[in-house]
Amino acid sequence: MPVREVLLAGADDRDLTKLAEYQAIGGYAGVPKARAMSSDDLIAELQAANLRGRGGAGFPMGRKASLIDRSSPKPKYLVVNADESEPGAFKDREVMARVPHRLIEGCLIAAHAIECKDVYIFIRGEYLAEYEILQSAVDEARAAKLFGDVEITVHRGAGAYICGEETALLDALEGKRGQPRPRPPFPPVQGLYDAPTQINNVCTIATVPTIMEIGAAEFAKIGPESSPGTAIFSISGNISRPGNYELLLGTPMRELIYDLAGGIPDGRELKCVIPGGSSVPALSPDEIDVPLDYDSLAKIGTFFGAASLIVVDDRCCMVQLALRSTKFYMHESCGKCTPCREGTRWMVQLLEKIEAGEAELSDLDLLDSVGSRMLGRALCALADFAVYPVASYLKKWRSEFVAHVEQGCCPYGGESSLEGIVAPLDAHRHHPGLEVIA
Amino acid sequence: MSDDVTLTIDDREVTVPKGTGLVEAAMAAGIEIPVFCYEPRLGDPVGACRMCLCEVAPGPPKPQAACTLTAADGMVVRTALTSPMARDAQNGTLEFILVNHPLDCPVCDKGGECPLQDLTFRYGPGNTRMTFPKRTFEKPIPISPLIALDRERCILCYRCTRFSEEVAEDGQLVAVNRGAQSVIATFEDEPYRGTFSGNVTELCPVGALTSTQYRFEARPWEIQNVPTVCGLCPVGCNISATTREGKVKRILSRNHPEVDEGWLCDKGRFAYSHLGARDRITAPLVKAGPRRFEQVSWEDALDAAESTLRAGGASTVTALSGGESVEEAYALAKLLRQGLGANEAVLPEEVPDGFDAYRAPLSALRDAKSIAVICDEPVVERAPVVDLWLRSARRKGAKITYGVPEGDVEGLVTDAPGPRYGATNVYYLPRTPNGRGVTDAWSAAGDGEPVDEQPRLLVISGDEAATDPSVRALAADAKFVLGIGMFEDSFRGIADLVIPGTSYLERDGTTVNLEGRLQRQRRSVVAPVPDVTMFISKLAERFEVEVSPHVSVLFGEVAAKCFGGISFGDVGERAELPPRAEEVSDTNPVSDTHTNPVSDTHTRAAGTGLRLVTYRPLFSGAAVERTPELEFQKPGAEIQLSRDDAKERGIKNGQTVTVSSNGTSFELRARIAKDLQAGVVRVARDHAGDLHANVDVKP
Amino acid sequence: MTLYDAIQAERAKYPEGSRSATLEALRLTQEKHGWLSPDALREAAEALDVTPAYCKAVATFYDMYHLEPVGTHLVEVCTNLSCALAGAQRVVDAFTSELGVAPGETTEDGDVTFRTVECLGGCGYATVVTVDHRYRQFVGPDDVPAIVEELRAGS
Ligand SMILES: Cc1cc2nc3c(=O)[nH]c(=O)nc-3n(C[C@H](O)[C@H](O)[C@H](O)COP(=O)(O)O)c2cc1C
Ligand code: SF4
Ligand code: FES
């Protein structure tokens, strides 16, 4: 049960998109507090809070700030990653739609820590309503002279999952094709416009005001020691009460699925859970007694990822699940590096062959091998994201893959919940004149 | 703290300077790290192809892209040589690259000199596990009359697009689409129009971008590459001429880091087809009618030339092109000055030597913090590669001013003698490829003064001189004209006797580039005619002048007077820049020896009008006229304006404007040029009609 | 305000000499012309002081730019995992029969372009549909006729 709310606190009772309402519950008090501190002290405070990034990697936000090369003569930048495109994730969106000022306050505090005057919030292009709310909140706060000498610019994306990857995001923000950059150099040293840049997820930044409010020491006490604070968990798929739940990190997964979200509807059986958005290794029903935090999930071989659970019931063909998932990653591969560009396409071709019942057992090993040759060898993690889930399906539900081979068709005989699903890739008109892969 | 770092690569310890890339560090240890996308001349590494994956400690327990790493103390690197992880990674990368590669090597121009073939041979899988239809594209598609693109062969290393974006900065060649559907393209069906486009054919590590001229012309094992130097502009880029069966088939760069950094302009790369032009002169010609020539035997040509010269005597005037080799110019000068006492020459241009005290390699331009460019003509039209050096200087943060700078600068690029504004490196831009060498050769051949009588004979050396309006005017007045050149059309109607000439690709000799660098040109193919020097040598015998037919001897005589007596053999494969000359006068080396044109030609013209500069486009002249593939590169009917002048008149880029100067007036397309100072406008010579120096431009 | 001036205003938000306004410039250009035709790309390039090829390179990278003509209205159905598990395909089929066009196509009268898209970030409210970029959530096959009706009425 949510012991305390951090990100969405107060949003049920009041319209916190309005500046006055947000200030009425103590909003923006953290800004003067922070500005009274030196950058070093503020960074020390943030490090003490041990707030881990909510964007996926779980890297401590304070440590990241400490890596910013503040000695550089160049301007320093803060970039908020609001590109939220991971299938299964819709939490950043709720924060921007309901508590935009908390995000803005977090920006102003973090900006002071790294001596930054220009903040950019990169919001995915599809989030139109959220953009409008956020933009008017920014304008309202600016008009209320809360910015001081800081400027916040909301920058809209134009539809590309890869722009969630921090360096691709920077290129998109620079008006280029959003393709990842090699690292090193890392953004804290050479980021936006080649200047030192801090990049954080929406929820990470929106948590910062609470650290200012209650102090790092108190914050560090919330939830498990290794990852304090709360997270908004998005849960979707075959689940009775889908939606966002702000919970303490470390809340048991079973509790979220069965007590809070009401379990599996239509009297079906739970088949698998993809715990971090579609890009992480899936868990079988016997693996869901795990606390929802970075380290516990890592221990059982998956990732916290985007804190987004996709629940799958027993009507779903795992080969179709793998195929649909891989079509997404092929569609979103930026095309810059070889293993991802060629590998995702090859995986799709193999999975289609398997689903069609035309594969041999050796094709399952080939699929596995192709994946293993992509893992850890691409320029960014998208290639890994394509492989992780498929590798886990292949490992944990191998019998279903084998059944496709042995029966020479999909054992679900057209009854799978994903039967016939049309992916954008299948009807590709976005790039005129080019192949639509059969 | 030392400036070196020591690391271990495949158990070999190697010490390299701080900042050395891992790929170079391995090279220093004699170890290959295979690469496709990595090319330091294209800017920061992109880490795209993943060919260079190695095991690197310290670092994450997965293969690292070596091309994106710099050598550090204590680093332990394992390549495919000693690391199973690296070997599998590199093998995997090649498998992925080949998954959609057509493997049409037998019909691919790159076959046999293809990095993809070589690396697959060394690191790739022996077989394919790909059983699905490969990606197919329409192929080959011409992205310009010069370049064909095969998208199936493309491995998306982004070398060509990075060149276009970050070196030439023309923004013409780009990647479109995303993921597996990414392809290289120009905008719609527009050709890749840019002075340096051809370089992408050399950068491409596969057969995706090929030269239309070289397509299906030769196999690598049938060709020779002759190391020589381009003779088409004063930069003198180092090149290799690829020849097969006595014909030049293509021109490749032969990277001279101080001169060209491995880049060529499209004129130098593609204009070689002029060697086989239909109006190439293959035998001596005598006038046989107003627009007709007749071939004569070499013996008759000798007799005719002798009597002509005797008739011409000391008043004979000689017009030189500046495209001759030092030796050709010297042989001719020696015959005329010593045999006839004919000391009157129309040199291609005045080349001040005062700047030689500030001589520096072109590569030094890149490191200058501030540069002034005092040249009304676009630098790229006169000395293309200099424009690339200026661009890389700007990318490195140099402040570049066009026109007279306020205060001092580090580097000066100028087309006229004049003050140097405190510059320590000065680059003078001659008009002609070897203007400097020709001037030296002429002066080395004698020191007599011109006689003061009405000239009867005009000797025209070279096609460039023969097609120069002022020379043609002289020809009209002369009783008799003796020409030496390659193409009939250049001399038709003006010359009475023409001796066949040869191209810079067909002769041995030397040439002096704009830096003052003496470079060696080698005979790449045998000309259809004997060397000019051979003819002159024979002719000279009849005047009791000793002109050797051997370039080494001719060079020796010039060198004794002008090049510090070095021998022909000493002019190396990759020539060094001679030491700086003594300073002539401390503040202003040349303004006291010449009236200073800077003050009158480089300042705003009087009145409300704009000062018109007509320039000779790079893509013009005898060689280009005879290379149809280069036609599309010629400048359009446009007028270049500075931003300010355009704003002032409310003129937008690309809009049609009316240009008028006393009486005449016609329409041109406006182009806003960043390298123009206010008050000056530019039009290519062929489009300037009879406009005067002071024009009005209206929307 | 002309497109040119609007784009200059966007450029002013970012450091001198950066190309950061490109994405927004292309969005504005598309709003003006409906899709990014070659001439539209030229117009954007002129205002951004970049080459048309550069604009094409960027425009073809992102899904929200149209490089072919599209209908007056745009209907997009998410068919990524969560929506798919909740029956997105039945919604797709409903639109296909109501509009008479397959995903990726535009109705004969050029009124509606219909396509499937990847995750829209509404997984908890499946099936998510956007109509002219506005989200509709919990859309089932039965809601489709009304939506199409509304569109037809709208134009
Ligand atoms: C392919 C890919 C997609 C990503 N998408 C997102 C995203 O949508 N939102 C996000 O916050 N981080 C995303 N990330 C993670 C970011 O690269 C980066 O680690 C994160 O924004 C850092 O913020 P944090 O430290 O606050 O977590 C993605 C990473 C990859 C490799
Ligand atoms: S892994 Fe995929 S998305 Fe990432 S850089 Fe390579 S091609 Fe682009
Ligand atoms: S050479 Fe290193 S990634 Fe291409």
Image (cartoon, grey):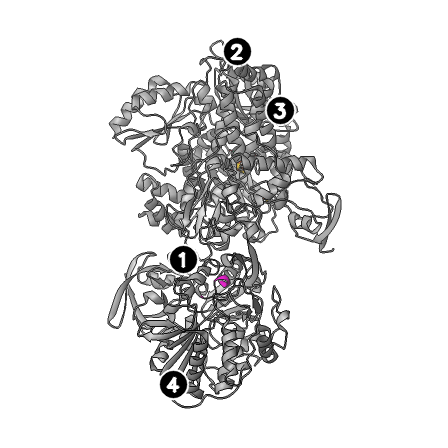
Which numbered dot is residue B630?
A: 1
Q: Amino acid at mark 2?
A: Glu
Q: Under tag 2, what secondary structure?
A: loop
- Same chain under badges 2 and 4? The reply is no
Asked whether, in this view, residue C76 is left or right of residue A368, the answer is left
Q: Earlier in the sequence, mark 1 or mark 4?
A: 4
The quarter of the picture where the N terminus of chain B appears is: bottom right
Q: Secondary structure at mark 4?
A: loop
Q: Which mark is residue A297?
A: 3
Q: State the image coordinates of residue C31 (x, y, percent, origin top left).
A: 33, 40
| Residue on which the image places disc 4 | B456
Labels 1 & 2 near each other (Cβ < 8 A) = no
Looking at the rendered structure, the secondary structure element under dot 1 is: helix
Rendered location of residue B211, percent (x, y): 47, 51
Residue ID for mark 2: A269
Q: Which residues are magenta?
A: B382-386
Ligand 3 position by quadrant: top right
What is the C-alpha distance between the residues marked 4 and 3? 99 Å
- C-alpha separation, residue under disc 1 versus residue under disc 2: 71 Å
